[in-house]
Image (cartoon, grey):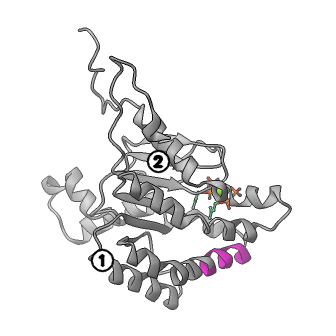
Amino acid sequence: MAEAVVKDAGAAPELAPPQHVAIIMDGNGRWANSRGGSRSDGHRAGTQNLRTVVETFSRHGVGYLTLYAFSTENWRRPGHEVRVLFDLLREVIIREVRDLHDSGVKIRHLGRLDRLSDELQTLVRQSMELTRHNTGITLSVAFDYGGRDEILNAVRGIVADGVPLEDVTHELLERYLHTRDLPDPDLIIRTAGEMRLSNFLLWQSAYAEFYTTDVLWPDFGEHEALAALSAYGQRRRRFGRAPAESRH
Ligand code: IPE
Ligand code: IPE
Ligand code: MG
């Protein structure tokens, strides 16, 4: 457990908890396969740990948690699977938002809303509206999200607003991203052992620490969350600088 780490005298101190953790929730299909179930069973199982995961990161000082639930490329999956994922988003909102609100969680959506059904758009907007003044952890759900889409959209917005060339800075571009009011992720976790970003937070992840685990998403719970936080605590973040302890 993170608290149980014994520090050697003279060892570099542990990093403070990440302010923003973002998770690429992967492996639902493999989880179902290994049990002889359908991919839908895997996706359903992958919604059961939501509360535990939010609660664990929140309790350990994480202020922002972002979950990648459906990418702009996931439209390439069979229509039936896409429908299951949309139905599950609806179910999860109906089942969980009240409790999340009572726990002070602030809900955000990242990505496109216009390809969601009218009902789902309304549910997403209502969840954000209901929780907008909450002061607990900010839970962003990336659904119909793609990093390239987001950056392209930002560029279009900047051009449409006629922003003069000299005003186009990092900070300005960030104000046109879906994540305009979120800090960059400090830690990106990917389950199911893959080592890629799959179009997730491309701009924002420039200096994120990356952590992967072979655990499949439906099996990711408190233990795995703590393991990820503990691994993060041991990292040395340099942001391009030379190591502090090096000789010049
Ligand atoms: C993650 O699980 C859920 C989504 C991407 C929507 P997958 O459905 O990608 O599961 P695998 O990778 O096939 O095991
Ligand atoms: C990434 O998982 C997208 C989400 C977790 C929503 P995928 O399973 O879609 O990624 P690839 O296709 O293996 O890269
Ligand atoms: Mg996958």
In magenta stretch: residue 158:
no
Residue 37 in view in this figure: yes
Residue labelled with disc 2: 188
Q: Amino acid at mark 1?
A: Arg
Which quarter of the rendering shows the C terminus?
A: top left
Asked whether the residues under the numbered discs 1 and 2 touch, taking CB atoms below 8 Å apart as contact, a structural biologist would say no
Residue positioned 41% across, 32% down in the render: 235
Report the residue at 34% width, 78% height from top.
Answer: 131
Q: Is residue 5 left or right of residue 169?
A: right
CA separation, marks 1 and 2? 24 Å
Q: Residue at x 26, y 20 (%)?
A: 244
**What residue would you read off at disc 1?**
132
Q: Amino acid at mark 2?
A: Ile
Percent of width and height locating residue 183? 29, 54
Nearer the camera: disc 1 or disc 2 = 1
On the rendering, which quadrant does ligand 1 occupy? bottom right
Label 1: few (<14), some or many (≥20) within 10 Å? some
Q: Which residues are magenta?
A: 79-87
The residue most toward the right is 36
Q: Which mark is residue 211?
A: none
